[in-house]
Amino acid sequence: MIIPWTLQRYLFFEMGKTFLLAAVGLTAVLGLGGGVLNMVELGQVTPGQFARMMIILLPLSAALTLPLAALFAAASTYGRVSANNELTACRSSGINIHILFLPALLLSLLAALVTFVLFNFLIPSMVMNLEKLLMPDLKTIIENRLNRSRGLGLGNLRIFADDTTVDVSNPNLVELTGVVFVETDDEDWERFGTVGRVVFQMDESEKSFSASATLIDLNYYDPKTGQSFSAGVQPINDIDALSNRFRYKLKFLQLGELLHFRSYPLEWHTVEDELERLRIETAMLAVYDQIFADWSADQELILNDNRTTYRIFAERGGQRPREGTVELGAGDRKVRIEVNENGGRRRIVEAQRLIINIPHAKKVSELAFHLEAYNVSISAIEGGDVIEKPKERLTPIAVPGEYSRSIALAPDHQLLKGAEGGENATRLERRIDSIKSRRDSVLREIDSTLSERLAFSTSVCVLVILGAALGIVLRGSHVLTAFGISFVPMLGVIITLVMGKQLAQNEGTTIAGLALTWSGIAVVLVIDLWMLAKVVRR
């Protein structure tokens, strides 16, 4: 077999020149004309910001234009060679026409390799930087959410405000005034009222973002007790509604990170957050069960930490099935609480009923008992005046580590098994199902992302060969003809990639989506083989 290396080099260098010129021109057009100028107003950005945008945006544009430039170069070069009857001369000299596709194959492999590297190693971090650069500030995000009919959601809180101000010296500090709020539990109103002001703080580190809010000067009404209350400060940590807007997304991950989370999906932050909430709720229910069992043994319960000791006596008690809290006393069966604080303050609190509650925390180690006593009589142990109150909130006391240590150290797979039965199993079942669903969603998104990146890079090889074959058959010596030949098949592949990725991320259509992702490449490959075997030979 004759291998004309001189002709091969000639074709490769001709394609290379066309490829470089087309790549530079298309990247500049897409990056400048179709990118930054449509996203920002040049009068509102500094030269430094514009330069940063260019550094980020041009590689993004290059990843999309390199395959098209390779297609254009192959179709243009082989079309011109065919139009000049150079292939006829090669065939007359006994040269196998298929050998002349080697330069097109090499160019396609080079373009595919560069595209693969860009999509999997360079572009993910650049996309994140671009999103951070163009991301609206905290004040704008909060105002947009406040303008919704349902207001700003912060966990179980729904907030409405009249005015939003930002600290000039710290744009990540935003304050709301004229605030009203509603706190719900499923569809029931737990409490509602007004807040003097709400302060939002956005904390940004190298690899994470977190938002927090503080409610200051609360006045609210509790429909369950029919009473009004006041509170000075109530913190709300790690607000999902805002933090998720700033968090990493799977599209920001490089190839190695995607493969890691493909093997360990429970470590992805959205699943990890859900797991931590499950761990906290599991620990809370376990602690409720433990202290209720301790009380049931002899109608006495001792709670203590390094600051305060509570010795609680009650003849009647029970657990609230819905929230798991422990309630002691009822009717004429009063509760007696002996309070001994390290500072030497000792007193007796008698109440008609006592509710022991554990508010949600960010970590199991931060759980604490909150005790609320109703219809209270307070007196010193040594005697003296008796103080009557409708309600008394005792000093919070940390949950002892031995109550929750087994839950805090439990592996993730054990947590996902849930409780072994009873009320706790029913309470945790919905959250466990949610975690498993989120985990499966992460796996589907990772699979679709990996498939899309690999398929797009692979498509360059078959598309360049098709462009070269079409250039020969149509004798596309004209630039516009070569460009049209290049664009149409690539557009079809991109459509199948986009549609396939969307289907692959949906439950029930994952296999169909992955198949559709690769279907466009398969069709082009079949056309390549048919043209090389039949059309070009003739």
Image (spheres, helix red, strand yellow):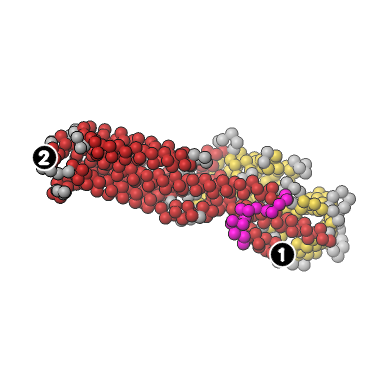
Work out which residue is located at the far right of the displayed protein and give it: 332
Q: CA distance from mark 2 to mark 1?
A: 96 Å
Identify the residue position indicated by label 1 in the image.
Answer: 305
Left or right position of 88 against 233: left
Q: Amino acid at mark 1?
A: Asp
Q: Position of residue 309 (x, y in %)?
A: 76, 64
Q: Is residue 31 visible?
A: no
Label placed on residue 506: none
Q: Position of residue 196 (x, y in %)?
A: 64, 44
- Residue drawn at the location 13% of the way across and 37% of the way down: 88
Q: Position of residue 15 (x, y in %)?
A: 20, 44
Left or right position of 16 against 143: left
- Helix, strand or loop under label 2: helix
371 up-or-down from 505: above or below: below
Identify the residue position indicated by label 2 in the image.
Answer: 92
Near mark 2 (Cα within 10 A), the count class, few <14, some 14-19 or many ≥20, is few
Q: Which residues are magenta?
A: 409-423
Q: Position of residue 528 (x, y in %)?
A: 28, 39
Q: Amino acid at mark 2?
A: Ser
Tell which of 307 and 420 is nearer to you.
420
- Residue drawn at the location 70% of the way across and 44% of the way down: 219
Tell which of 33 and 286 is nearer to you.
286
- Residue drawn at the location 28% of the way across and 48% of the way down: 109
Q: Is residue 423 visible?
A: yes
Image label count: 2
Left or right position of 524 against 435: left
Image quarter where the C terminus lies is top left
- Helix, strand or loop under label 1: loop
Left or right position of 354 against 486: right
Q: Is residue 434 magenta?
A: no
Secondary structure mostly seen in magenta is loop
